[in-house]
Amino acid sequence: MKKIKKVNAAILIIGNEILSGRTQDKNTIFLSNWLNSKCGILVREVRIIPDVEKIIIKNVKNLSKKFNYLFTTGGIGPTHDDITAKSIAKTFKIKYGYHKEAYKILENYYGKKNFNDGRKKMAKMPITSKLIYNPSSAAPGFVTKNVFSLPGVPSILNSMIDNCKKYLVKGSKVHSKTLNLFTVESNISKKLGIIQKKFSKDVDIGSYPFFRLGKIGVSVVYRSTSLLKLKQVSKELNNLIKQKKLKTLKI
Amino acid sequence: MKKIKKVNAAILIIGNEILSGRTQDKNTIFLSNWLNSKCGILVREVRIIPDVEKIIIKNVKNLSKKFNYLFTTGGIGPTHDDITAKSIAKTFKIKYGYHKEAYKILENYYGKKNFNDGRKKMAKMPITSKLIYNPSSAAPGFVTKNVFSLPGVPSILNSMIDNCKKYLVKGSKVHSKTLNLFTVESNISKKLGIIQKKFSKDVDIGSYPFFRLGKIGVSVVYRSTSLLKLKQVSKELNNLIKQKKLKTLKI
């Protein structure tokens, strides 16, 4: 992986089961963490959309243009509602058909006798795509231009993710620190706003209420590619703690 | 609530903590289920975006136009990164300032002495918005045109949600049935595709692999506003079970 400064990505979750509230999405949190910690790539937008071809095409077109990378999850299995591969082929006007290497992988995995139409469908994709190998259930994901297509089942996605690395350009890792304070947001909001303004170029400061051990608290999360700037913010936050006489929670 | 046929909605999750993978989003699954089961409203798109004003404005504009309702979560607290209210005011070119009723509610809740600037900020919103009362921590959500703005903390959002009902037009509830089969998707994909085609107007059929009790299975989920059509699909699926001699799993 080559290293450049700021690399970003979007995630497109394709699947009625997530939209309908039937299934809890677990791929966003996994992909965001993996992309940032392993590749220094920041996820800047996530969309969840239904299994509808023209909606998939519109979103793939839009997000692949706006961001360095797009990761799609879902819709690459053998059934009628698995239309991601075909939709991506249409998006980029690439021929949709059997990918020779994918076909061979799946034929080997199932054996010639059991290699039925449903299974063969999983070898169909934009024919010029590069494969993302799948160590757990053989059916590969694929990379088309800057779009990475992965399955929706979290355990399978997780097993494949490291095979995306070789196709990605690495960015600078965003470091993150968290300070847990036993106080309410409105008690520190003014000072926190001043600190954020001072470091607006380099550090993102977020503030999130929590309830723990029967008490109300605030997690102050600050993130930056620069460890030096994070240290400077830590110093300012320590001053705030002293000034307001706040208790902290270590976890 | 008046009853019309098809009513849809989008969800806009505003918050760096979800995008960065720090926090698991729980609001999508809760809102989708509540909207469908209580109001017959179908969620058709979800987006997760950062706390950046121009990005919020662009997405609120786009999604509030495309769908009957838009639900935003996050960014309505007292700190510098809570910019949802201001962004929505800008989106619709409505004055941003103290909402009289919200101000009174919060002043009562905190007492005049403790009603500091951070807390006062939570009474600021598009001044013509209608309030969504908050029984757990007082700070209200608000409805601006067709946009419902709720907090990001799931427990608080959940406690407020019933207070949205009076502002919503009800749609037809989507009923859902699930059939769990001990088989692999590729064994039933062909027949499932034929059934979906036959009922393409009225029923959505999805197929989702599962792993349970050491076995591989497929959940076939079919959804429709018509109970009659669901029954017809059940019959077709029973034929498939007999034909393929499949075992089912009841849960």
Image (spheres, coloured by chain):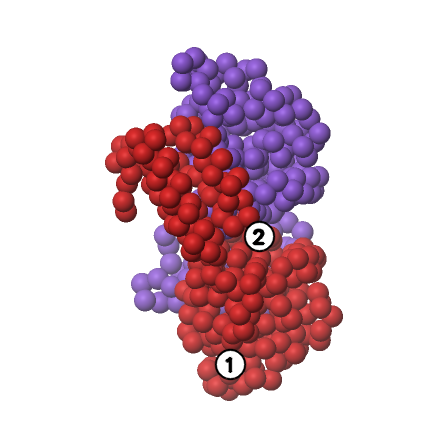
Chain colours: A purple, B red
- Report which residue position mark 1 lands on: B106
Q: Residue at x 31, y 63 (%)?
A: A213
Chain to which the residue tagged by mark 1 belongs: B
**Residue A89 occupies which quadrant of the picture?**
top right
How far across and how far down the image is residue A71, in percent? 57, 37
| Dot label at residue B173 | none
Q: Amino acid at mark 1?
A: Leu
Q: Residue at x 39, y 67 (%)?
A: A216
| Vertical side of A167 occupied by B182: above or below | below
Along the line of sight, which residue is nearer the eye, A188 or B240? B240
Say whether residue B184 is left or right of residue A195.
left
**Element class at badge 2:** strand
Chain to which the residue tagged by mark 2 belongs: B
How far across and how far down the image is residue A101, in percent? 54, 15
Q: Residue at x 59, y 77 (%)?
A: B130
**Element class at badge 1:** helix
Q: Residue at x 34, y 40 (%)?
A: B238
- Report which residue position mark 2 lands on: B45
**Residue B100 occupies which quadrant of the picture?**
bottom right
Q: Residue furthest right?
A: B93
Say whether residue A216 is left or right of residue B47.
left
How far across and how far down the image is residue A245, in percent? 44, 68
Q: Are marks 1 and 2 in contact (CB under 8 Å)?
A: no
Along the line of sight, which residue is nearer the eye, A213 or A163? A163
Q: Amino acid at mark 2?
A: Glu
Q: Is residue A23 visible?
A: no
| Vertical side of A168 occupied by A214: above or below | below
Q: Residue furthest left?
A: B213
| Vertical side of B102 occupied by B71: above or below | above
